[in-house]
Image: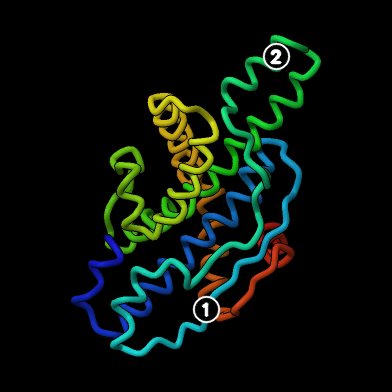
Amino acid sequence: MKRNKLSHRSFHNRLQNFKHSIAFHEAGHAIGICLNNQAKQQQPVFFQIVFKDPNFQQDELNSTLEDESVARIEGGRLIQSLIYNVDDLTDKLMSIDESLEPLVRDYQIAFDSDIINLLIGPLAEAKQAYLNDDEQFNYQLIDIKALKNYGGDSDLALAWDYLESYSKDKLKQDEKLNELFVEAGNFISDSKNWLAITKLADYIIHSNKKIISYEEVISLINS
């Protein structure tokens, strides 16, 4: 179910569905940052989830459905400054000095993790939408471009910033994106990860907070 397919419903139902979509989207990002990074033995990285005031009027909702700025993750990225031509550069570094292998490997893992965490958000929103409509969800049946229908425009744009730094070769970029899309899909298909996403999404919906801290998310995961 796309966000723009909510228009035939009542204002209350549309607003509630929109809030649920946003909650699962941001919960996906946040749980990815916590659990996906942990699984890849990456250092904890701090973030907060920030929401706009959700008091929309009925005539504002249609434009709001497509507005990705109503919620965002501040922080949460392992890589702060991208290195360009990563693929070629890492090969050259390894050929010059094999002792650099741990540093190169750590950068590659952090690079992949950041993109996976970007993709988990819209995938979580897509899964919630399917389940809400009593439909089976299989991420393998979703085209990556279709994530734009689930609030993924800015996520995909940032992912492409990473990929353009990875290689000048468009084929290599596409291969890397497909590889990481599978990892993101497998992440939300894991029952423990999905339970954590659902738990955080419920917390987001019912707390009605404008800011949810990293510490709150960690406490929720561990409770």
Identify the image's colour scheme: rainbow, by chain, secondary structure or one colour: rainbow
Q: Is residue 192 left or right of residue 17?
A: right
- Against 4, residue 197 (above or below) is above
Q: Amino acid at mark 2?
A: Met
Q: Which residue is mark 1?
A: 52
Q: Quadrant of the N terminus?
A: bottom left
Q: Secondary structure at mark 2?
A: helix
Residue projecting furthest to the left: 8
Q: Going by the image, does 122 lie left or right of 78?
A: left
Q: Amino acid at mark 1?
A: Lys
Q: Residue at x 23, y 67 (%)?
A: 5
Element assignment for label 1: loop
The residue carrying mark 2 is 94
Q: Estimate the x, y position of residue 200 in percent, counting from the top left.
A: 57, 64
Q: Which residue is outermost to the top?
A: 95
Badge 2 density bin: few <14, some 14–19, many ≥20, Cα 10 Å? few
Task: Kindly identify the residue that appears in the image at 63 percent across and 30 percent down.
Answer: 108
Q: Are marks 1 and 2 in contact (CB under 8 Å)?
A: no
Query: In this picture, is 129 found above or below 85?
Result: below
